[in-house]
Image: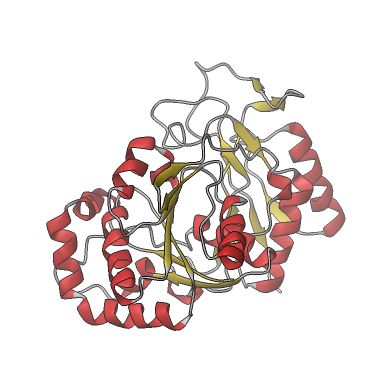
Amino acid sequence: MKAALIQCPVWWTVDPPLGLAQIAGCLSHAGHEVSVFDLNIELAKKRLPGYENLWNWEQFQFWNHPGMVARFFRDNAAFFEGQLERILRTEAGLIGFSVYNGSQLASLELARRIKRADARRKIVFGGQYLFLEDNAESILSDPTVDAVVRGPGDEVFPEMAAALEKSGELPVLPGTTVRTKEGLKNGGPVKPLRDLDSVPFADFSGFPLGLYDVQERLPIHGSRGCVWQCHFCSSHPFWTGYSYMGGDRLFAELMEHKRRYPCEAGNDFRAPSQPFRSQLSRHHLRGGERLAAPSQAHEQALHDADGRTRAQGHSRRRHRHDRQLYVRLSGRN
């Protein structure tokens, strides 16, 4: 199945969007042909006068005003016409948009243009914006969108592609809402993804790596959710529970990215466990790779047999907002 994945503005410009890369890796692993369009970074590098500051985080609310987004599309008409032609030339029957707060209106506008050009293309929206039920319902009020994924797409999106290729219709799966001939059908609760070791590697091969601000860095999603569930944290509303990769699995992906790309690999970890640190340290000692692992993460996360998570170590009173572990891989090929 040919699939296209699209990131519309606004998103940051430091390194490639990991959500898109992760789904690209899952689709490729399942045997599908993937084309990636990070329109956010291309527009950020070609920003017109008057739009210079719109990729600053404090300006992201611009992208939530329909009139302003419509004006942006008019002022960048030639760019979007060219991108529309590129997307259609891929012959992708399934087109996925990675959507966050700030990118939903631009994603809808481009999706409408795709549908007007070829109504046969299936448009699916996913991303953390759709994890919230109200947002999913709002997006589906626009008939342009054929389905939304309301949770992790690692398993769901390849299954949707396989079913679409076989039957010509999008399946109604757990964690999705699909527009059918009978109306919208909800597939029920999201299926939690607890075993991150089983997830295919992210695939950055389709990204314009030379355009990002830090060209030697790639992100890795080594954990999802957090043991603390702090209300001020952006992960709290989206990721229930907590899961993380083992050190062996993470190291394997680090080495694969090092082999394929001239990069460092950045990893946002929350409360990594002692087994993780032991596994990663073993590779560090045996392989001679220089891995810098700062000791900001105070907690040790222990998983019960039934998948629940406990945290022990420093108390919440002493917990600081510096518990993220950032693993850097240096010594390039």
* Position in image of residue 54 (x %, y %): 23, 60
Q: Quadrant of the N terminus?
A: bottom right
Determine the image quadrant of residue 262: bottom right
* Position in image of residue 138 (x %, y %): 29, 44
| Front residue of this view, candidates 51 and 131 | 131
Identified at 74% across, 54% down, the residue is 251
* Position in image of residue 77 (x %, y %): 21, 78
Identified at 33% across, 65% down, the residue is 111
| Front residue of this view, candidates 311 and 104 | 104
Q: Is residue 286 left or right of residue 243?
A: right
Q: Is residue 149 visible?
A: yes
Q: Is residue 219 visible?
A: no
Q: How is the image coloured?
A: secondary structure
Q: Is residue 110 left or right of residue 146?
A: left
Identified at 68% across, 63% down, the residue is 30
Q: Quadrant of the C terminus?
A: bottom right
Q: Is residue 246 left or right of residue 272?
A: right
- Farthest residue, direction front: 182
* Position in image of residue 224 (x %, y %): 57, 40
Determine the image quadrant of residue 233: top left
